[in-house]
Structures are given as structure tokens and as C-alpha cells.
Image: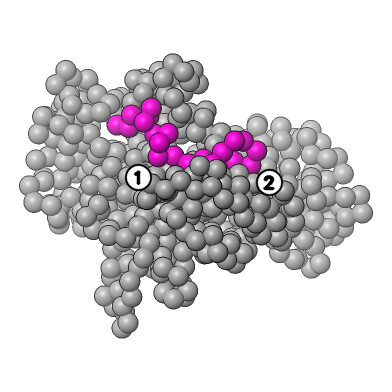
Amino acid sequence: MKVLIVDMTHGGTVIASQFTEIPGFHVYAWDIYQTLKEDVKTSLRNKNVEFVGIEFLKDLDEDSWVIAPVHCNLGLYIEDSDTAESSNGTGKVSRFMTHHEAVDFLMRKRIDVPVIEVTGVKGKTSTVSMLKEIFKDLNPLVLSSLGVEVLENGESHLLKGNISITPASVVEAWELLEEFLERSENPFEVGICIFETSLGGTGLADVGVLTNVVENYSVAGGTNCAADAKSQIFRSRMVACDFESFNSFYLNSTAENPAYNEMMVKNGISPGLQNGILMADIQDKTNTFSLNQDANVKASNIEFGFYETVFQVEVSDLKTVNENILNTSFEVSAFAPAPYHLQNILSVVCTALTLETPVKNIKKGLKSFKGINGRTSIREYNGVRVIEEINPGLNVEAVKKAVNMLSTISDEDNGSAVVFGGKYGVTCEEIDEKAVSFVLNRLDPRTDLIFVDDLGKNVKNLINRDFTFKKTLDDALKHALFTGSGNVLVVYRSNYSDVERR
């Protein structure tokens, strides 16, 4: 049987290698972005992987499988056929799978512990980090944009840094764990997996988490959108989903929901069927969370603080993995200096309760979470309070929320400054400079605005208020200190590990 793996840039090498180990498959690889290094090609060829190009698509037949990432629109390359049985009509093949579905196919019998998968536009890494704290007594295997780690009796072992969060990284994380346990003098049991995954879930999860769809950006060359791609999370056994996103894009996926229906038709997908999931059936397995809406998990009596926010969790008719219904209320204190941080906490509470985690474990785990260096963290710099929002996936919505957070802490006696900048090419999605400039132009005139690095150099040309430009982050912080700012918000597009090396 032929199996064509499309896109070697976003995890296809791992998937192709895995399929070579399954008898009966003849594996082909299409390096559609031409990024693969020659030594990696040689390694795959040694495993009998055959590299092909667009011309190979003519040779697909009813005995072929095609595996492509959800952001790759193969409809641009493969002619429709009446004999096609694939879910999206991409061609004459017996089976079409996304990379996410392929990982489910490869790993379902290998991973034998509960799984949590986290996807969304913003807040994924923070959500994973809080879940790690809650479940650390179970020796979790954790995959996030910060790397792959496993906890052993509370002690973290970093198995790999600088890893992507493509679905194929789930395979890599599990194999890194297996290798680590084989080398360990005192092997231990991993009790849960917590995976951050881009553009949806694999279907392996007992609870899939959709943090939000705050920006429904386009994928697949503009022929698809984030909300559709991330709908793969609903292949999970249960789902914890942001209330607003659920109601805007996924609930009642028929004519009853014009916004959803319009999105599906625009992207050439039959309403009601999305990524092989009958979306009208998802309500029974979805719990929602929200700050202000009538969700299954919401917050009340909120008292925001820089280092600790105290609030009441209200739980209403939450469905658990064991088919129980939960109604309760309890107080939580956690690091959440702004509403969008609290929203991430609610996603974590919703997830943990869905797994029937004791409330005392949830409260203890959240109490121990102090933020992630860069996203979001608060530190002192020569007597100045510095709030860092350093994120490779920085987008306009994140800038808005960070600036709004600053406005809640500023006062006339303690001046504030915003440092904005960063790098290009950190992720596949670039930032909308005009939209960012609109946000920064509306800053309080009393707030100093300091641009830095390549991104700052471009955006400053769109600004019609006073600003300063500095070449480095250190220079920008020194300038803010010199001008007397008591609070400095750093909004910077980069990997935090790169910033640490400055």
C-alpha cells in the first residue's frame, strides 16, 4: 500500500519514519517546502522512504493513503474524483488523513495512560504549565513549546528543548520518554501525558482543551481558518472549551448558527461535518469556561493582584469522564495579574474537574504556579517592576491585552513605559503591523513608548505619537529606568530562550 506523507517541515519526517516500521506500507515523502537537509533525506532513504514531487500525485490510486497537515490544502494539487473516499474530496485515494489523525493512528495502542491535549490561539503554554503543577504527583510527560520534560517525584528532567508543537512531536516526546526510562537506574511510571499541539488535537486525549480562538486567522493559503483546523480537538473523548469560541464557531453547526455555517461554506466544507466530526454531536462531551458568560466553569468575586489573584470558582452541570455531573463552588488563589490570565486558569480548572481531580489538588497546583519566564512573568530590574510578555506567537490580540493590563496598574506617581519589538520569522504567522500600530497609537500620552529590534524598527514608521528607538532590549530597559518609569511592560516577539542569551 502506498502512503504519501506531505510536508517534511512540520513533522512529516517523524511520521514517515514511523510508517516504515509498519509492514505493508511503501512510504513516499513530499518535501513540499524544500527545507529538508540532505543528511535527514539520507536517513529516511536508508529506511526505504522514496522522495517524490508534485508529479507523483498522478500516480495515486484507490490503494493509496495521503497524509498532510491540516494547513496544507491538497485540493490545490489533487483533482477531485468521483471515486474518492477521503473526507474532503482531495483525490482518488482510499484514505486521507491529517498529520493529527496519523499520530492518533500510530500512537493509540502505544500510549496507555490518560492524555490531555491543549490547543488554541493564545494561552496554550501557560495552560500546560499549570496542568503540570496540578498533576505533578502523577509523574507527567509534558510537551510544550518550552520542550519535552518528564517529572519524577516532582523533579523535572528535560528530555529535549527547542521542539515544535506539531502533532508529530507527540510521537517524538513518547519515544524520548521510552529512551529515558530505559537508561534510568530507577525506572518509574508516568501517570499522565500533557501535550501542547498546534492547530487541533490528535484524538488521543481523554480531555482536549481549546483555550480560545481570539483570532480566526487563515491557514492553507487562505482557503481555511484557525477555527476549522482547531476543531480537530473535538475528536477527544471530552473537551474543555472557551465559552465564546464554542458558541461562535462550533455549537449547533447548522443553519441555527449563521457564523459557523458561513465559515464552513466559505472554506468549501459541508456544514455539520468538519474534519470528519459531526459537530452537531459535540455538545454532550464539551464543558465550557468563561469569566463572564453562563459557562460550566466561571469566576466570581474576583480580586485581582499583581502576584496573587483571589476568586471564587462556580461549577455548574460539568460533565466528567466517568459520566458524572458536578456542581460545586470553591475559592482559588493564583498568579493571574489580568483577566486573560484568569481565563487560562479557568481552562485548567475545567480540564482538571472533567478528569475528576480532587479540588485540593487543583488549588495546590495553582498556588504553586508563578508564571512562565517571559509569558507572563513579573520581575524587578533595578527597582523597576518589569512585566514581560515574550512570545514567539505574539499577535495583535496579545498586544491589546498586555497594554490593557498595564493601564490597570499605572498611576500618576509611578510612570509607565511600553517596550515593543521583536523578530520576524519566529513562527509561520507574521504579525499585523498596521493593527499593532493602531493599538500603540492609542496608548496614554503619559506612557513612554520604546521600540526595539527589527519589528520595532518597522512599526515605528506607522506611529504618530512620541517614541524612542533602541537597538536592544537591555538598552530599552535602561532608557525606561533613566526616564523614571516605575512599571515597564515588555511586549516582544521571540522565543524566551533567545532573549535569555542576549
Q: Which residues are magenta?
A: 276-296
Q: Is residue 388 left or right of residue 270?
A: right
Q: Where, by quadrant of the figure, is residue 160 drawn?
A: bottom left
Say what secondary structure mark 2 lies in.
strand
Q: Residue at x 47, y 67 (%)?
A: 136
Q: Quadrant of the N terminus?
A: top left
Q: Give me the disc on residue 372.
A: none
Nearest the eye: 370 or 250: 250
Q: Is residue 358 above or below residue 252?
A: below
Q: Where, by quadrant of the figure, is residue 279 drawn?
A: top left
Residue position for label 1: 237
The image shows residue 100 at horizontal and vertical percentages of 32, 43
Q: Quadrant of the C terminus?
A: bottom right
Amino acid carrying label 1: it is Arg
Q: Residue at x 63, y 42 (%)?
A: 291
Q: Is residue 290 magenta?
A: yes
Q: Is residue 458 left or right of residue 157?
A: right
Nearest the eye: 304 or 314: 314
Q: Is residue 347 left or right of residue 483?
A: left
Residue position for label 2: 300
Q: Is residue 192 above or below residue 122?
A: below
Q: Is residue 446 above or below residue 383?
A: above
Say what secondary structure mark 1 lies in.
loop
Q: Crowding at label 2, few (<14), some or many (≥20) Cα neighbours within 10 Å?
A: few
Amino acid carrying label 2: it is Ser
Q: Residue at x 12, y 39 (%)?
A: 2
Q: Crowding at label 1, few (<14), some or many (≥20) Cα neighbours within 10 Å?
A: some
Q: Are marks 1 and 2 in contact (CB under 8 Å)?
A: no
Q: CA distance from mark 1 to mark 2?
A: 29 Å
